[in-house]
Image (cartoon, helix red, strand yellow):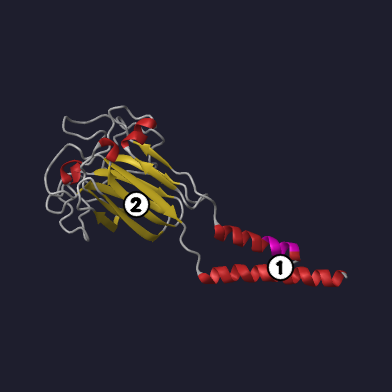
């Protein structure tokens, strides 16, 4: 191997370690119609009614009626992040009547009921530390007390949103859904507040985010929310840095040797 090849390998390893700058990600909203007078907007993934603003979640077969899907493109840019909200949905083409809200505080363990939740999907393209923040939508004067549960995987078609599920937040029921595994949760205790959790070393793949309220009363107004999802690269092990430095050193030594032979 000549010194040019050695230097090229060292440069490639260094570039892979350093990664790229802040990335883009995109979210697609299900702007399908309401299915009942007391329903949230939208609440269906039925092919006859679902209308996606930026592409459907390919491969989703679940019966949990999904409100949005985030395609996190952190494979090409490792620091992907986005902000999901009612305003963003409308800006992306959802009807003016569209609203992201999880009514009646049904994440709360004492009152949990699946059909009042909002269901979001995450398609994570590369391994990451993923920070999720759910907050009351201040722009809409929301009094929401936000909470969420993250699951690894997407429902494969057996889930049923109707019924209790969250008596124990650390071991929640999955409402019969197959293909999902509890990953963690976070909950606020203040109306109009926010809650954040970082999930470390998540492998690339599909995740489900169930969003609900942690308040103690059943209310159907002022429950709008926003979600911020930010991906950060999983830190490179020290051994990998040493390997990259060693390759760079080999390249320098080879270059010096070749220069000495030429002299």
Residue located at (36% from left, 33% from top): 52
Q: Residue at x 40, y 51 (%)?
A: 230
- Circle 2/circle 1 CB separation < 8 Å: no
Where is mark 2, residue-wise? 132
Q: Residue 153: x, y in percent?
A: 34, 52
Magenta span of residues = 4-8
Q: Earlier in the sequence, mark 2 or mark 1?
A: 2
Q: Position of residue 257 (x, y in %)?
A: 79, 72
Q: Relative to the observer, which residue lies in front, 27 or 226? A: 226
Instruction: Rate crowding at label 2 as few (under 14), some (14 to 19) or many (20 or more) other CA atoms within 10 Å.
Output: many
Query: What distance separates the C-alpha of mark 2 from that of mark 1?
Result: 42 Å
Residue identified by numbered label 1: 251
Circle number at residue 63: none
Tell me which corner region of the image, top left, top right, bottom left or bottom right, holds residue 184.
bottom left
- Most prominent secondary structure in the magenta stretch? helix
Q: Is residue 203 left or right of residue 46?
A: right
Q: Residue at left 36%, top 47%? A: 228
């Amino acid at each position: 191997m000549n010194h040019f090849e050695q230097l090229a390998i060292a440069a490639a390893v260094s570039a892979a370690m350093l990664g790229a700058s802040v990335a883009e990600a995109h979210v697609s909203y299900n702007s399908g119609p309401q299915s009942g007078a007391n329903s949230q907007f939208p609440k269906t993934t039925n092919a006859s009614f679902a209308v996606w603003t930026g592409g459907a979640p390919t491969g989703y077969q679940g019966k949990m009626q999904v409100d949005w899907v985030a395609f996190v493109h952190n494979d090409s840019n490792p620091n992907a992040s986005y902000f999901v909200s009612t305003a963003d949905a409308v800006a992306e083409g959802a009807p003016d009547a569209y609203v992201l809200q999880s009514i009646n505080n049904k994440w709360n363990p004492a009152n949990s009921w699946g059909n009042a939740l909002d269901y979001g999907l995450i398609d994570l393209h590369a391994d990451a530390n993923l920070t999720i923040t759910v907050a009351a939508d201040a722009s809409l004067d929301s009094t929401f007390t936000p909470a969420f549960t993250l699951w690894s995987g997407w429902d494969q078609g057996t889930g049923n949103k109707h019924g209790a599920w969250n008596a124990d937040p650390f071991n929640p029921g999955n409402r019969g859904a197959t293909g999902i595994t509890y990953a963690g949760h976070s909950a606020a205790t203040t109306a109009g507040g926010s809650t954040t959790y970082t999930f470390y070393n998540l492998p690339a793949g599909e995740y489900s985010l169930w969003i609900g309220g942690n308040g103690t009363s059943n209310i159907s107004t002022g429950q709008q929310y926003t979600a911020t999802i930010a991906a950060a690269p999983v830190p490179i092990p020290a051994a990998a840095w040493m390997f990259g430095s060693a390759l760079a050193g080999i390249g320098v030594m080879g270059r010096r040797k070749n220069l000495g032979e030429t002299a």
